Image (tube, grey):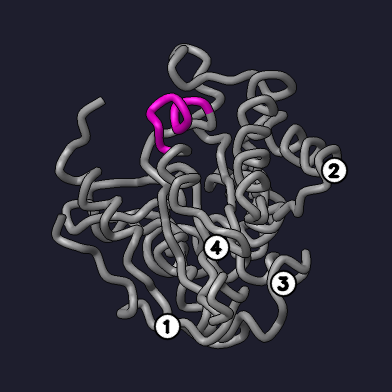
Amino acid sequence: MSLTRRQVTGAALAAVPLAVAAGGPASAAGVRRERTVFIAGDSTAAQKYADAAPETGWGMALPFFLRSGLKVSNHAVNGRSSKSFIDEGRLDVVLAAIRPGDFLVVQFGHNDSKIADPTRYTEPWTTYQDHLRQYVDGARARGARPVLATSVERRKFDASGNAVPTHGDYPAAAIALAAEEGVALLDIQALSIALWQRLGVEETKKYFNWTGTEQDNTHFNPPGAIAVARLVAGELVRRRVLSRADVRRLDEEIPESWITWPAV
């Protein structure tokens, strides 16, 4: 399969360290190396480019919460499901790069529900779990630690102002699989819908990609991406995937100006 210029550039960007190493697992030569948090997911996590600004994936903000010695390699791509990501060879790319001591955070579900699209659709309790197992098994086979994350919730409220879940059985299926496989689970769906509920109907517009021409209730702007990345980093600590010493700024304000969008 041929890759577009953006895909090639994205693969190159993903290989560039986003944090300076300070420690990690010992290499064969006895020198400690940096560890990498790989992200496999969809548009809510993906790297965005200048033509999409101010749309921002939470993976773009995650490095702000990780200390020296941890870097992020963000392979999340717009529109992908747990199935299409594998079918396009993207999991193979991740598994070729991942090393013992690294982490693979997997967040799919937004596009797995596209029942009219057989290239992306998975059924929550069968094929969705089957595909997620491939990420889990692939990471473990290479000495890396898999982490499953439920899909971050969309901005949807009912007439009474209650935040409404939109992902059906996919979060429950991911939670069940994590328990079955003994994998750390970040319940970002539950955390994000609770955050949207606290913020309310109007305030949440400041976290999603609402512009003068667009009312996007799925994708984030910089404040939203930063808020979700903070949830992810906090859960990585709470679930003991990372130690408290691995993260920073969990209780600090992150300037929106830190978010940048590459030209390509």
- Indicate whether 86 appears above or below 33: above
Disc number for residue 257 = none
Pointer 3 residue? 237
The quadrant of the picture occupied by the C terminus is bottom left
What amino acid does circle 3 point to?
A: Val
Residue 50 image point, x, y percent: 18, 58
Spatial separation of the CA atoms under disc 2 and disc 1: 34 Å
Spatial separation of the CA atoms under disc 3 and disc 1: 20 Å
Mark 4 and mark 1 lie on one chain; the one further toward the N terminus is 1
What amino acid does circle 4 point to?
A: Val
Q: Which of the two discs, 4 and 2, sits closer to the camera?
A: 2
| Segment tinted magenta in the rendering | 83-90
The quadrant of the picture occupied by the N terminus is top left
Q: Can residue 190 be seen at all in this image of the molecule? A: yes
Pointer 4 residue? 228
Q: Which of the two discs, 3 and 1, sits closer to the camera?
A: 1
Q: State the residue in front, 21 or 73.
A: 21
Mark 2 and mark 1 lie on one chain; the one further toward the N terminus is 1
Mark 4 and mark 2 lie on one chain; the one further toward the N terminus is 2
Pointer 1 residue? 20
Q: State the residue in front, 111 or 132.
A: 132
Disc number for residue 179 = 2
Residue 133 image point, x, y percent: 68, 33
Q: Secondary structure at mark 2?
A: helix
Q: Residues within 10 Å of mark 2 (few under 14, many from 20)?
A: few
The reply to whether callout 4 and callout 1 are in contact (CB within 8 Å) is no
Mark 3 and mark 1 lie on one chain; the one further toward the N terminus is 1
Q: Residues within 10 Å of mark 3 (few under 14, many from 20)?
A: some
